[in-house]
Amino acid sequence: MPDQPDKIDQTIDSDNVYCAHCGTENARGGYSCTRCGERMLVVTTDTPSPMGLVSCARCGGANFNRAVHCWVCGTEMNDMVRISPATPVEPVPKARTYEPELNPISVPAPAREPKDDRADLRGPAADSISGSGPGTSVGPAPVANDAAMSEEPETNTSGMKRGEVPRDIKRWNWAAFLMAPIWGIFSGVPIAALMFAVYLPVFPSTLRFMTLMGASLFLGFRGNELAWRGKKWRSVKHFKSVQQRWVVWSIGLNLAGLVLLILLTGSAAEG
């Protein structure tokens, strides 16, 4: 292929151009060929091309080196004349790699000491193995016992029939044992007021005593749980404070009644 270094003045008077792939005539400004679908190209002598440009032997129009047909006149590109050398392609720069030995700022990290698994041991054997003295604590801090835990449940379940009863109030209640009917009315256990019926003379004395003692023992053991679920309390602390006052009053009234009974019995004996 002969070289032609001089540029060619390219003038196009037609409104149509030709596909460089199949030679079909297309309207100027179209993006792709209406026949083969290849992209329509418009080439001038100033168009950069890695493979260089060639001119058509018929019309002298500039075309790419691999064009099959001239885009100006549609002639098959058999006798081509090179009009510009191939544009050199710039090499892609090589990716830089990090080399620690060439970086004066980087400092190697200090080596970590291996973990001593013997520190997890418990008791005097751990002191003898690890060399720690009697004043050195080994292992994590002890977990707090139940007494140090909060008395309050996560939610206030008082007043709920099936609510959870705090562990701290599951204990004996002297007020429910000594003054069950009166205590039950004001503590959310109204069923305890039925014990007033035991004092009616229609029941035999033995039956009254056994019923009264059985109900009192039951309320003594389960009174706090029934009161917690039978009435809404502000908190466990409030519940315990109220029940403590009931215990003081019940013991005081029973002692006063016992003293009065002794005095009356003594007076009757003297008379």
Image: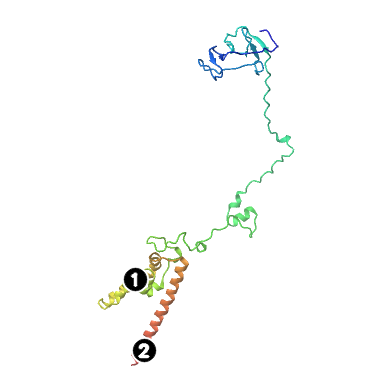
**Residue 266 marker:** 2
Circle nearer the N terminus (2, 1): 1
Say what secondary structure mark 2 lies in: helix
Residue 51 position by quadrant? top right
* Residue 132 pos. (x, y %): 64, 56
Q: Amino acid at mark 2?
A: Gly
Query: Is 271 placed above or below 155 here?
Result: below
Residue 163 position by quadrant? bottom left
Q: Amino acid at mark 1?
A: Ala
* Residue 53 pos. (x, y %): 65, 14
Query: Is 101 placed above or below 17 here?
Result: below
Query: Is 174 placed above or below 59 here?
Result: below
Residue placed farthest to the right in the image?
104
Q: Which residue is mark 1?
A: 192
In the picture provided, is 104 more to the left or to the right than 131?
Answer: right
Q: Nearer the viewer, mark 2 or mark 1?
A: 1
Residue 107 position by quadrant? top right
* Residue 203 pos. (x, y %): 26, 76
In the picture provided, is 63 more to the left or to the right than 172?
Answer: right
* Residue 31 pos. (x, y %): 55, 20
In the picture provided, is 20 more to the left or to the right than 191?
Answer: right
Q: Residue at 44%, 74% (x, y): give it.
A: 245
Residue placed farthest to the left in the image?
202
Say what secondary structure mark 1 lies in: helix
Quadrant assignment for the C terminus: bottom left
